[in-house]
Image: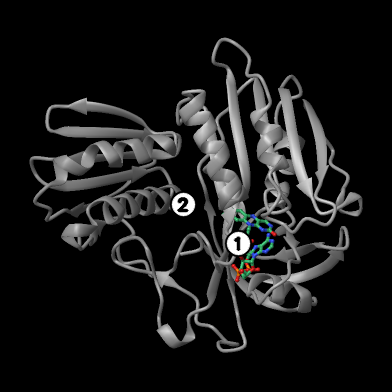
Amino acid sequence: MESSVRELACEARLNLQRLPDYMDSITDRLQSFEADASHDGQRIDFRFAFGGASFDMERLVMRANAADRDGLARIKDLLATAVQVYARDENPEIVWTGDLSSETSLAQFREMTVTDVRDLTAHMRRIRFAGEDLSRFAKFGGMHIRMLFPTKDVPDPLWPVLGASGLPVWPADDRRPVARVYTIRSLDVTKGIIDVDFLVHPGESVGSTWVMQATPGMRLGIMGPVGRPVRQAGWYVMGADETGLPALARMLETLPAATKGVAFVEIADEGEKQAIDNATGIELHWLTRDGVPAGEDNRLANAVRSVTWPQGGSGFGWFAAEAAAAKVVREYWRGTLSLGRDETLAAAYWRRGAAGLMAG
Ligand SMILES: Cc1cc2nc3c(=O)[nH]c(=O)nc-3n(C[C@H](O)[C@H](O)[C@H](O)COP(=O)(O)OP(=O)(O)OC[C@H]3O[C@@H](n4cnc5c(N)ncnc54)[C@H](O)[C@@H]3O)c2cc1C
């Protein structure tokens, strides 16, 4: 008899009065994670590279299927997050039934141990972490992780587990670690290591404070990967300050050699320049603040706005820096140049005076 590998599948009922009203936003969000959407009567089907999903408006149910547990966990997480975001007025209760629904270990979580600490520059510190089975962090096109830090108040945190909704559940509020978002600068799945480049910045903080004290043997948690895949394009305009530099450098090292474009990186001073093994034809320019505090200088946004885009729609704009600069660039690309959401990503990586942006 022929043996065939059975797909994993599960579903969750959606007791929502206004499900059809949310579907445009849910579809938009899932498409930004590279899902293809198709309509079939009262059902919308989504196809990801790693599995499928559907929303049935008549039966009020959502379904997920995938070939493996990582894929199924990812789709459950994407669907549950979309429903929680767009249907939050109806306070949705999501309970998955079917394959793996009794699991409590969180597929996207790993405990990691520091194995090496190295200063790249006076303000950029590279930390190497070792952990088990990191293959999922090379999947799904997400470059970032939520790092879960022990703090002075919670030195011995309890790590999250998987809830019935497919989303993380925190065992005890008073033992909850503090989350911050960082980029996987590089990843070696075979050796079980990831490198993260941390900017050591002034002010009271969680991530930066932890990094200043980091020594081999220290532990923290990571969840991910998070973030949308960056669109493939033949030409890019890129802009980043020190917080976006790890992602920009990773892209320059991994995009195809034929890729063209221009990239600007804002740093405090000449001493913050670092070697990047640029494998592409993208021209890299460093902009120094020379005494102007981070988040107060507008030359990065100005440089990115001065670039002429190629005719013909094969370009992509990528920007990651302080929130005010990201807003200026987003408004220019989307408003002034009328570029689409699928052609640009201008993200706030931190906000002056605000702690923990985007980590929730
Ligand atoms: C998708 C994504 C990827 C990111 N990747 C990286 C990365 O690889 N490396 C990295 O270093 N950062 C990265 N960041 C930025 C990082 O998450 C923030 O800088 C975060 O605020 C750092 O947390 P913290 O605990 O050190 O400071 P917080 O506790 O969040 O903030 C404390 C104070 O420090 C200020 N502050 C925060 N960041 C800066 C800064 N860059 N310069 C000056 N003041 C600051 C805040 O405004 C606040 O006043 C990324 C952010 C996102 C959204």
Q: Nearer the viewer, mark 1 or mark 2?
A: 1
Query: Looking at this view, is 265 or 106 the one in front?
Result: 265
Q: Tell me what residue is drawn at x 22 percent, y 33 percent.
A: 44
As shown in the figure, which amino acid type bears the numbered disc 1? Arg
Q: Crowding at label 1, few (<14), some or many (≥20) Cα neighbours within 10 Å?
A: few
Residue bearing mark 1 = 352
Q: CA distance from mark 1 to mark 2?
A: 36 Å
* Ligand 1 shown in quarter: bottom right
Q: For the residue labelled by badge 1, is the local secondary structure a helix, a strand or a loop? A: loop
Residue 203 image position (x, y, % from top left): 69, 73
- Amino acid, disc 2: Asp
Which residue is under mark 2?
Answer: 70
Where residue 241 appears, x then y in whole percent?
71, 48
Q: Residue furthest right?
A: 271
Q: Residues within 10 Å of mark 2 (few under 14, many from 20)?
A: some
Q: Please, what secondary structure does the residue beneath circle 2 have?
A: helix
Q: Closest to the observer: 36 or 263?
A: 263
| Near-viewer residue (96 or 309) | 309
- Residue 282 placement (x, y as % from top left): 76, 27
